[in-house]
Image (spheres, rainbow, N blue to C red):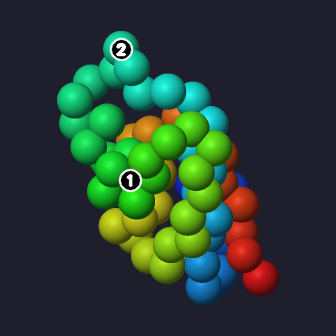
Amino acid sequence: MQTKNIDPNAKTVRVTYVKSAIGYNVSQKRTVQALGLRRLGDTVEQVNNPAIRGMIDSIGHLVAVEVVE
């Protein structure tokens, strides 16, 4: 999912790890870890800021994102 669909005014976003990073670049695996995701199905809530949105953009094919109200 691209961050274009995320409202920049939202306070937090919920990120769920839905696809394995096996076979992908090491930097993408480290981005998954940096977001606090460890296992498939893990969900974390992160503050919605440009750094987090950039991380989500780089691994958008591995995670599902939703805005938390």
Which quadrant holds residue 12?
Answer: bottom right
User: From this viewpoint, is residue 60 visible?
Assistant: no
Can you say whether 51 is above or below 18 in the image? Answer: below
The N terminus - image quarter: top right
Q: Which residue is mark 2?
A: 23
Looking at this rendering, what residue extends furthest in the top direction?
Answer: 23
> Badge 2: how crowded within 10 Å, few (<14), some, or many (20+)?
few
Q: Which residue is mark 1?
A: 55
Q: Nearer the viewer, residue 37 or 4?
A: 37
Relative placement, left or right, of 58 versus 69 is left
Q: Are marks 2 and 1 in contact (CB under 8 Å)?
A: no
Dot 2: element: loop
Q: How far from the left and from the top, in percent, is residue 10? A: 65, 81
Residue appearing at x 39%, y 20% in the figure: 22
Q: How far from the left and from the top, in percent, is residue 17? A: 57, 44
- N-terminal label among 2 and 1: 2
- Please name which of the two marks, 2 or 1, marks the residue nearer to the observer: 2
Relative placement, left or right, of 54 versus 39 is left
Can you say whether 58 is above or below 42 in the image? Answer: above
Relative placement, left or right, of 11 versus 30 is right
Which quadrant holds residue 6?
Answer: bottom right
Q: How far from the left and from the top, in percent, is residue 64? A: 65, 46
Instruction: For marks 2 and 1, give the CA distance.
Output: 18 Å
